[in-house]
Amino acid sequence: MSWPHGTLARSGRSCPGTSFGDDSDTTAHNDPDVASVLLTEPMHGPGFVVMAVHRPDPQLLERQISSLAAQTESNWDCLIGIDGAGVETLQLLKRLIQDDTRMRVREYDDNVGVYKHFERLLAEVPGTASWVALADQDDVWHPTKLARITEVLSAPGVTAAMCQARVVDARGNLLGFTDRMSAGLGDLLFRNQVTGSLTVFSSKSVTCALPFPAGTSDAFHDYWLGVCAAALGEVRLCDERLQDYVQHATNVLGERDPRSFRAGIRAVLVCGVRGPLDRSAREGWGWRVNMETALCPTSWLERPGVVRRGRKAGPPPDACGFAVPRRRPATA
């Protein structure tokens, strides 16, 4: 599904003169102040940014919107999706966006959580987009972030590019730095290195990632996108700090705090190892199994945008480009 222009709507609901390809029993938001943010501009460039919003801190959201608007790479459009209806959030976004015609807002009545919400936002990325960036509602992008990362992404064979960040609190006080590393598909399946808000993906990576595998409590949208990008090409690191990665009490996801590791060790000492191991097997490994199932040769080659790279007469390649041997027929 491609995302139409000139829209601010609720959960696939059409505003006058627009179409979402959805004939469900819905009506447009009728607040005249909100309706005034309706936009009719065509796409501004090859890039596309999706921002997930849910009950945002107004000050942090304002800083994020301002930092996005101030990017030196300005040829992009942005879809801001509200996960769960809220007139206050709509009003806030109207005030922050003002007349920036690159930004559009879409409100979804149902709150589905970060994993499924990013999936439905990415499903709205136009087919003409050449790169896709993910944005959280509370970070601060440095002015050259998109310019530098898209430059790295433009290299042959690169399907995702990510940067480092300053880790800060809500007031901007420095807490530390990220230490992301380049990793291939095999490494990523065991330990994620891809943080969505630090990464720009090729449109091919996003296309191949949809629909997302069945999730568990350990399922992360950026993890799956990183795995798909690694299966298609190279996930390359731009080893520069190009963002303030904000940590606060209401983060859904965030940088791992060393204290959480120590707390986990204490829990094991007090309660025993069986509980944490059972949960890890059920949720963590279960999520990896779901990803690997989606990457298996039959499933992967059915995904849009995946091209067989094997010889015509040979067996089909798997997600990594290696040939998958056919079983020999049983002999009598």
Image (tube, grey):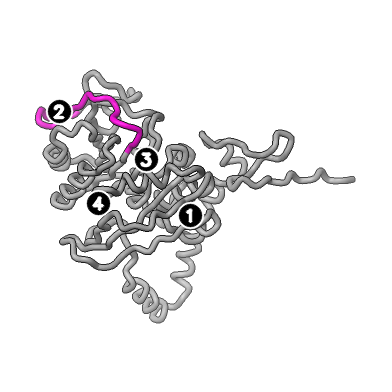
Q: On the image, which quarter does residue 164 sit in?
A: bottom left
Disc 2 versus disc 3: distance between alpha carbons? 27 Å
Disc 1 versus disc 4: distance between alpha carbons? 33 Å
Amino acid residing under circle 2: Ala
Query: Where is mark 1, residue-wise?
Result: 287
Asked whether disc 1 touches disc 4, contact meaning CB atoms under 8 Å apart, the reply is no
The disc label shown at residue 132, or none: 3
Secondary structure beneath dot 4 equals loop
Q: Is there any visible trace of residue 162 in the rendered image?
A: yes
Considering every residue shown, the one lying at the far left of the view is: 33
Disc 4 versus disc 2: distance between alpha carbons? 31 Å
Span highlighted in magenta in the image = 29-48
Secondary structure beneath dot 3 equals strand
Q: Horizontal placement of 310 versus 145: left or right?
A: right
Q: Where residue 8 appears, x then y in whole percent?
A: 22, 30
Mark 1 or mark 2: which is in front?
2
Q: Where residue 117 appears, x then y in whole percent?
A: 33, 43
Chain-order first, disc 3 or disc 4: 3
Q: Where residue 34 appears, x then y in whole percent?
A: 13, 32
Chain-order first, disc 3 or disc 1: 3
